[in-house]
Image: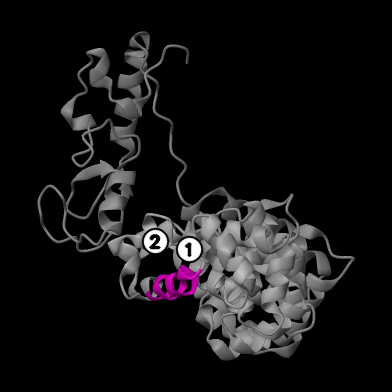
Amino acid sequence: MPGSVPLALGLDTIGLQVPWYFRCPISLELMQDPVTVATGQTYDRASIESWVATGNTTCPVTRAPLADFTLIPNHTLRRLIQEWCVAHRSLGVERIPTPKQPADPDLIRSLIAQGPALPVLRKLRALARESDKNRLVMATHETRAALVEMAFGGSAEEAQAEAMAVLALVGMGEAEAVDVVGREDRVTRLGKVLGSQATTLEAKVNAGAVVEAAAAASGAEARVVLGAADGVIEGLVALVDEKANARAVRVGIRGLFALCLAKENRQRAVSAGAASALARRVAEGGCTGELERALAAVERLSRTEGGREAVVSGAGGGAAVVIALVRAMSGRAAEHAAGALVAVVGGSEVLQLEAVRAGAMSQLLMMVQGGCSERAKRKAQHLLKLLRSAWPTTDSMANSADFLQPY
C-alpha cells in the first residue's frame, strides 16, 4: 500500500507501540507466522527455525530442553495480530499475510498410493515447487522410492517424465541413489534422455538433476558407473552450454562437478568438451551461483591430458582464462581458481606474465596472509613461487618483506 511501513523496519519508527505479546521473543519484531514449541512458548517461525538451525536445543525464553522440534502454528494469535494490523491501517500498517502451511504428509502418502497417474504426478510436482517446506515433507524414503519406480518403471513415457521432474525437485538419499545406479537399464535411460535430440530441454534438465543427486548421494564407484553411461557426461556438457537457461547451466555444472570427483571420468569429460564449456562459463561470468563447483571441476580437468588446452580454448585464449581465474581468486572459490591457474600457467612464461599483469600477486598474498584453508594457502604459495620470476624486479612489491618470504 502507498505510504505503508515495511514490517522489517520496525513499527516503533512511526511511534506505534506493538503489544509485547505480538512480538517474537527472539527478534522483538511483530510476528508474521507465530508458532508454538514444545515448552508452550510462541515465536515467529523464521526466528525459531534459525535458532534451532544454529544448533540450539533449548527454548530461548525458558531455557528448558526442547523435547522435540515440532512447530505448531498458533492460528489464534496470528488472527489477533492480523486484526491489530487492520485496526492500525490508517497509520500505514500492512496486514500480515496468512502463511501457507506445509503439505500434509497424509496427503502425500495418499497421492503416492494412487500410482503413476498424470494428474497425481502433476499435483505432486506443484506441491514440490511451492516451497522448501513441502519438499522437506516429501523427502521421505517411501516417497522417493515410489518416485524412482514411477520414473524408471513401465508407466507411460509422459508419466515417467513427470515423475522424473518431481524426483529432480525432491532429491534422493543414498538408498534411492543405489536403486538408480544399481540398475543398468535406469542408468541407460538417464543417458538416453540427456543425449537424445528429441528430448525437451526441461526433460534433460530434470534427468541431469537426478544424475547429480544420485552422484552426490553415492560413492566413487557409483559416479564411475554414471560417467561411463553413453550420453550422460555429453548431456551435462550440453546443459552447461545452454546459457539462456540458468537452471540448465546450474544443473550441468553441479552434475559435472559431482562426476569429475571420480578420476575415471575426467578424461571422458575432457573429450566431451566439459573443460571448454566450464571455462567458457567462468570467463563469461555465467556460472549462476555455482562458481565454486565450476572452478573445482576446471581445476581437476586442467590437470587431465588435453584439459589445459581445452580450458584455454574454451575461455577464449590464454590471456582471457588467466584474467578470469585471477578475478575468481576471492572468497570460497579462491582455492580452486589458484589451483586451476597453476595448471594453466605452469609451462608458459607468457601466461605467467599475463597472470602478474592481471593482479595475481596481490590476490595470492592476501590468500597466504588471510583466513583461507591450509590447502588453499599451499596452492597460493606454490603459485607465488611460480610467478616470482615474472614479477618486475623494479616493482616495490617485488622487494617487499612479504614477497621475499620463502614461499
Q: Which residue lies furthest to the right in this view?
A: 198
Per the rendered image, the range of residues in magenta is: 378-389
Q: Which quadrant would the C terminus be assigned to in this image?
A: bottom left
Q: Position of residue 327 (x, y in %)?
A: 53, 54
Relative horizontal placement of residue 373, taking residue 359 as reference (left or right): left
Q: Where is residue 123 in the image (x, y as percent from the top left)?
A: 65, 54
Q: Name the amino acid type tagged 2.
A: Ala
Quarter-wise, where is residue 143 in the image? bottom right
Q: Mark 2 points at which residue?
A: 398
Q: Which label belongs to residue 391?
A: 1
Residue at horizontal 27 percent and vertical 58 percent from the top: 54
Badge 1 density bin: few <14, some 14–19, many ≥20, Cα 10 Å: some
Q: Can the viewer see residue 48? A: yes
Q: Which of marks 2 and 1 is nearer the N terminus?
A: 1
Residue at horizontal 30 percent and vertical 20 percent from the top: 84
- Tell me the chief SS of the magenta region: helix
